[in-house]
Structures are given as C-alpha cells and as structure tokens.
Image (cartoon, helix red, strand yellow):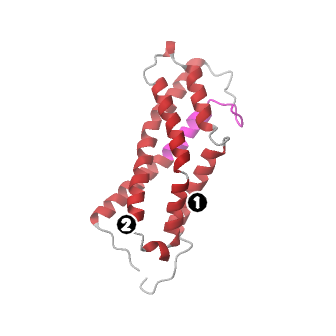
C-alpha cells in the first residue's frame, strides 16, 4: 500500500517532526540543566553551589519549559490527528500503531511533569534574586523529578525512544506487492 499524503498532511507531518525535535532535544537539555544542581547520582543539592547560581539554574530550567511544553502539546495534537487520519495503515504497518500507543501511554506522566513546570515558572518568573523563592523552587524541581518514585521521567523517555524506533524501523511491517 502506497501512502499518499495531502499537502495539509505533509505540512502537519513537518510541524509534528519539528515539534518532536524541539521537545525531545529540549527535554535532554533541561535534564542536563536540572541535574547540574544535584550531587551526581543523588537528589541531594550541591552544598558548594552558591544560592545565586542555584537560583539562576532554576530560573533557566523553568524558562526553558515554555518551549518543551508548547512543543509537546503540538506533538500530541498533531500526532493524534495524523495517527487517526491513517488508521488504515495500522494493520499493515504495526509500528505506527505501537508507536502511537507508546506515546499515549506516557501522556499522564508528561502532564504531571508539565504541572510542576508551570508551578515552577509561576514561582520563579518575576522573582528578583534578593527575594527568589529558592527553597520552593527546589521542592518543585524535586517533586517533578521524583514522579513515580523517580522512574517516571526515565521510563517515559525510554518509551518515547522505543516509539521513535518503531516509527522509523517499522519492524512489524507487512510485505506489500507494490513496494
């Protein structure tokens, strides 16, 4: 079965891919920023990091959530639309179905993390350094990271990597006579 996409579907696929790249890349960058606050391998904040540096790192982490939240929303909405538009391909290309289901499976974790991101932005956005809510911001970051006992964010990234694998490699693709 040959796939024929309309111009609208091609443009939507482009926006979906661009949003996915921004979201996944932003997630990795934000993890690097956020985990710089901790002693490696723990959730203990570095004692030798000055409070101003912690505040700046937390502010950068919070501000970067704007891009990842918007991009994730676009990935979900555009991906769902494309996924439902091409239901006929699910049987022939099982990777499309599996990839879509894996993304759907981790939406609650992303929504929960997004909730803490929004709280972190609200707490830090307009705060000056002299009255920065450092302890509140630290608590929100820790809660965000420890969703599902710390395994949630890691499992969701693993699930998304598996979804990308299924969408690209398509290991469950049925042979077709016109390809």
Does residue 139 appear in the picture of this structure? yes
Mark 1: secondary structure:
helix
Question: Which residue has dot 2 on it?
Answer: 85
Q: What stretch of residues is rendered in magenta?
A: 25-43
On-image quarter of the N terminus: bottom left
50 displayed left or right of 17:
right
User: 108 or 163: nearer the eye?
Assistant: 108
Q: How many marks overall?
A: 2
User: Mark 2 or mark 1, which is nearer to you?
Assistant: 2
| The C terminus - image quarter | bottom left
- Residue 29 belongs to magenta span: yes
Residue 9 percent across, percent down from the top left: 32, 63
User: Which quadrant would residue 2 be assigned to in this image?
Assistant: bottom left
Residue drawn at (51%, 32%) of the image: 61
Q: Position of 34 compared to 73: left or right?
A: right
Q: Name which quarter of the figure residue 161 lies in.
A: bottom right
One can see residue 168 in this view: no
Q: Position of residue 79 (x, y in %)?
A: 42, 58
Classify mark 2: helix, strand or loop: helix
> Which residue is depicted at the point 64% across and 38% down?
146
Q: Earlier in the sequence, mark 2 or mark 1?
A: 2
- Is 94 part of what is drawn in magenta? no
> Residue 103 at what x, y percent from top left?
52, 56
Q: Residue 81: where, in percent of width, then height?
A: 38, 60
């Amino acid at each position: 079965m040959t796939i024929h996409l309309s111009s609208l579907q091609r443009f939507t696929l482009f926006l979906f891919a661009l949003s996915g790249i921004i979201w996944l890349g932003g997630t990795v960058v934000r993890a690097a920023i956020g985990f710089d606050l901790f002693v490696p391998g723990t959730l203990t904040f570095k004692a030798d990091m000055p409070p101003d540096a912690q505040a700046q790192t937390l502010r950068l982490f919070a501000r970067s959530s704007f891009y990842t939240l918007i991009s994730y929303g676009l990935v979900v909405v555009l991906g769902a639309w494309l996924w439902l538009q091409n239901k006929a391909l699910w049987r022939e290309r099982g990777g499309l179905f599996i990839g879509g289901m894996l993304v759907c499976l981790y939406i609650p974790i992303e929504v929960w993390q997004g909730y803490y991101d929004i709280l972190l932005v609200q707490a830090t956005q307009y705060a000056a350094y002299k009255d920065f809510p450092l302890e509140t911001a630290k608590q929100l970051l820790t809660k965000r990271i420890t969703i599902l006992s710390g395994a949630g964010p890691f499992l969701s990234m693993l699930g998304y990597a598996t979804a990308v694998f299924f969408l690209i490699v398509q290991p469950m693709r049925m042979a077709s006579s016109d390809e």
